[in-house]
Amino acid sequence: MGRIVILTGAGISAESGLGTFRDEGGLWARHRIEDVATPEGFARDPALVHRFYNIRRAQAAAARPNAAHAALARLEAESSDVVTLVTQNVDDLHRRAGSHHVLQMHGRLAGALCDVCGHQWEAPPEMDEETPCPACHRAAARPDVVWFGEYPHYMEEIAALLAEARIFAAIGTSGQVYPAAAFVEDARAAGAETVELSLEPTAVSHLFDHCHSGPATETVPRWVESLLG
Ligand code: APR
């Protein structure tokens, strides 16, 4: 029994209707990262940031897992390997598809975090700069997501997983954001077989042993079928 580590990005949720960041017309073509995805942006204009995440939270809640999410849940349930998903996505579609071993390294849209006491709770559908922390009661709620300049979650666990990986796959990610973009190199160093599944070749495709281009709802079920035999 070995270990399969799968990194997912916005592309796996694209066919569930959730926009990606760097594709044509993506989120970062319509919003400035420094305004809506940094601690400085939040300090400057919390109302703008809350509005941005309230919209994304509603979109994620209305979205449904697609065949790619379902295929990864099937792989976890049926494979003799231990399968762990490391997702950059802040939607909850992997869990709603039935995956259990999911590490959300960039946090979760459905979560709220107190900027003062660090308390975490399930975010209400709409948050604003008056939303009180249930623990310390201060009006200091923020989305429980990792912004640029902040440290991703689970980095020690992820390093240990990559060191033992028999297979490492990256699905629906452009490989533009670190530290996730370097995971493939850590996995290669550990001797893992590396697979990229993305709509089209990425800037890091050359680092992978195998690349499958196409929509995730087609490539991921086919890849999982090839693993389960
Ligand atoms: N099927 C498979 N792949 C797809 C699909 C699809 N239907 N649609 C788009 N893609 C691919 C694109 O080709 C691209 O390679 O998904 C990738 C999306 O890349 P990005 O928009 O950069 O998203 P991601 O890699 O997840 O971004 C990483 O950047 O802004 C931060 O925190 C944010 O977690 C995010 C991180």
Image: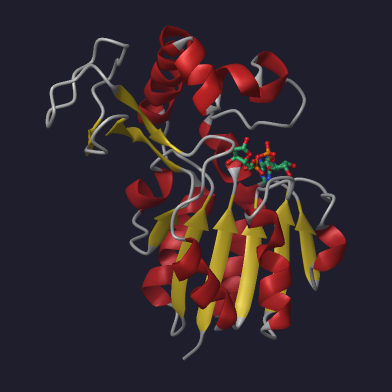
State the image coordinates of residue 36 (x, y, percent, origin top left). Answer: 55, 20
In this rendering, position of residue 124 left or right of residue 109:
left
Residue at point 60% right, 83% down?
166
Q: Residue at 66%, 75% (x, y): give it.
A: 187
Q: Say if 30 sits above or below 169 in the image.
A: above
Nearest the viewer among 106 and 70 is 106
Q: Is 153 or 84 nearer to us in this picture? A: 153
Q: Nearer the viewer, residue 28 or 215?
A: 28
Q: Position of residue 179 (x, y in %)?
A: 64, 55
Q: Residue 99, located in which quarter of the rendered image?
A: bottom left
Is residue 31 placed above or below 91 in the rendered structure?
above
Residue 6 seen by the camera: yes
Front in this rendered view, residue 69 or 192: 192
What residue occupies the far front of the structure in this picture? 116
In the rendered view, tell whether residue 34 sits above or below residue 212: above
Tell me, yes or no, if residue 26 can be seen here.
Answer: no
Residue 73 locus on image (x, y percent)? 41, 61
Which residue appears at 42% of the width and 31% of the height? 63
The quadrant of the rendering that contains the C terminus is bottom right
What x and y, as percent, mark residue 125?
A: 27, 20
Image quarter for ligand 1: top right
Residue found 73% across the figure and 32% down from its top: 22
